[in-house]
Amino acid sequence: MKVRLLRTIQWKDGVALTIDQTRLPWQEVFVEMNNCGEVTSAIKEMKLRGAPLIGVAAAYGLALTAYHSKAKERGELLKEIEESADALRRSRPTAVNLFWAVNRVLERARAVSGNAKALTQAVIAEAERMAEEDVETNRMMAQYGARLLRDGDVVLTHCNAGSLATVDYGTALGVIRAAREQGKRISVIATETRPKLQGARLTTYELKRDGIPVTLITDSMVGYLMSKQAVDKVVVGADRIVQDAVINKIGTYTIAVLARKHDIPFYVAAPKSTFNLNQSSKDVVIEERNPEEVTHFGGQRIAPIGIDALNPAFDITPIGYVSAVICETGILQSKELQDLRTI
Amino acid sequence: MKVRLLRTIQWKDGVALTIDQTRLPWQEVFVEMNNCGEVTSAIKEMKLRGAPLIGVAAAYGLALTAYHSKAKERGELLKEIEESADALRRSRPTAVNLFWAVNRVLERARAVSGNAKALTQAVIAEAERMAEEDVETNRMMAQYGARLLRDGDVVLTHCNAGSLATVDYGTALGVIRAAREQGKRISVIATETRPKLQGARLTTYELKRDGIPVTLITDSMVGYLMSKQAVDKVVVGADRIVQDAVINKIGTYTIAVLARKHDIPFYVAAPKSTFNLNQSSKDVVIEERNPEEVTHFGGQRIAPIGIDALNPAFDITPIGYVSAVICETGILQSKELQDLRTI
């Protein structure tokens, strides 16, 4: 089978176009981002989300600043780009790809010789290159990861680590796509992923679009299904991989504990731009989002007025729970994962 | 502190009055049930829910049949009551209190000598007695259970095992209420409990009403909070306790696995009417509810059209995960739980 791809971010003449993920699956609305502030807002509001896509979008954000700048001087332009970079860095604290992408574009900008125009061209070219690399990286990772899946496997995934989390192929869902392209009959169980419902809204949407069988469950059903031997493998993405842990969407750790208990392989698919091996889990800031995402559901209040709620957006899965990390250079098995610092 | 109680079911002159739990916390609407068919519908539609309350409501359902019957003959009336009993038994398959209550009323009815009027009076009296016993049972269980909680404990609970699941004091939340009445500062973490949101809607509602501090989380946050040592104890209710397992709201098993992993005591509070020790978990039918409860929320579709979903309403927690069962005759610790058959 061949999959129809969904390009989540496109650059055209000083405009970055993205699909508004907060409106999926009800409406397929593309929104124009005309400056870096609009990119920063889109990231904060989760119109675009997913660690790799956030990274590429941030790069395009800096490209927008450069493209529309009125700066005549190289130094002046660089300063504007650096200000945009600071705002981007404050948008979401956990996904490391954001910081990686911003730093990469800044380094490139600083390294360019020549005038403001040359610098602008270099920044745009770097963003475009990063988008292309993301696609290529996903494809390579998917080819490695697909080897881990067998014909007939039922794969559970959490949140959305698909086209919509990347530029167009996906990390965890890329692995599933590649296995399907190899002719393996893979079916997917998608957790709805409260509070933002990325599984219910986005993973089902893109798998249905590709004709990949998918069954939706609530997050609370994972243990029961595993105990009924209804899950063969787990594949998830990552927002950050540090020396001792994988940081990913809230609920991932619970699934990892359950997978271990039921002897189900637990795989993480993430590009190397997600790795931050200078850090340990103690160094990671877990983003706390607005409690209204928990007390409300689709704009409707579900809890009584005045009830407190917690809303950590991510959790921490110790690396010992991870059977393998799938990245663009291959599969890191548990032995190599024991000390990620050495890689 | 003294708690203000909420009587979930009341009998007055041939009408059973209940609070419509599907409309909480937005509206406090009491609905009249005028015949057993309305009770059966209310149970199916979860206007009233919670194993102990379902049991008492079923008894009142049979009382309604008797009260409004035009039967002159004892045998004729008994037949009508048996027909109502059959309909009640088909309403929800998992909570055993339903079957226990229906059988108890039927046995009482069959044992009564005298005419149709005497039989009617006996059935109504039995339903009233069961409601009173439920309150008394909850109070006793709560006194035993409160001993397990210490001043300052943060107690995680799932679904709603409170006033709203019983006649008026609660099982798991009764234990917490009793500890508070003893002056212990207990605070509660309530899981929202998808898909029907009993935690977000009902547990928060009744704890807020009682002034007991409560924090709402999504089901997916349990593992993270436990890993952060933010949970001291877990107390949940049960829909059925069999020889080898506790059957309770979907998601309970996941919490039990996480509690074990983090060495957190996992308590189940349930009256003996919830026990069915002639059965093992293999004998239990897990109710599969309408998948639209998962694909929709509050009438709004959250997943794309045509997406399959699963909706098991309960799961199975092996008895080995249970630190203690709290019932009206005392606390059954793990040693006694190893073979519940001997109790």
Image (spheres, coloured by chain):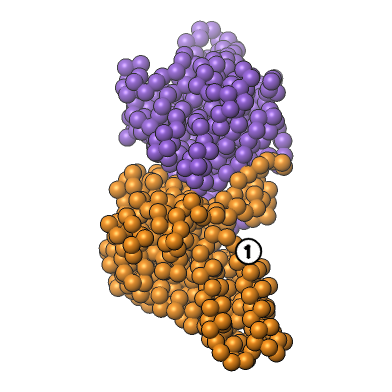
Chain colours: A orange, B purple
- Residue A116 against residue A274 in the figure, above or below: below
Q: Is residue A43 above or below residue B204?
A: below
Which residue does the image show at 51% across and 76% down from the upper left? A104
Look at 35% across and 16% down and name the residue there. Answer: B343
Find disc 1 in the rendering and name its residue. Answer: A90
* Residue A193 rendering spot, x and y as whole percentages: 51, 54
**Quadrant housing the C terminus of chain A:** bottom left
Res. B117 image quadrant: top right
Residue at x 56% of width, y 89% of height: A113
Query: Which residue is nearer to you in this view: B23 or A50?
Result: A50
Label 1 chain ID: A
Task: Residue lying at the far top in this picture: please name it.
Answer: B113
The correct choice, above or below, for B12 with respect to A221 in the image is above
Q: In the image, residue A77 lies at what x, y percent?
A: 66, 83
Residue A182: x %, y % from top left: 30, 73
In this picture, is A234 found above or below A49? Answer: above
Relative horizontal placement of residue B294, taking residue A29 as reference (left or right): left
Quick one: B84 or B343, which is closer to the camera? B343
**Near-viewer residue (A318 or A75):** A75
Answer with the quarter of the image where residue A98 lies: bottom right
Q: What residue type is labelled 1?
A: Arg
Element on which disc 1 rests:
loop
Q: Which residue is drawn at 57% across and 44% down?
A: B217
Which quarter of the rendered picture does the N terminus of chain A lie within? bottom left
Q: Is residue A261 left or right of residue B49?
A: left
Q: Decide: few, some or many residues near mark 1? Use Cα within 10 Å; few <14, some 14-19, many ≥20.
A: few
- Where is residue B292 drawn, in percent x and y? 53, 52
Of B309 and B36, the residue lying toward us: B309
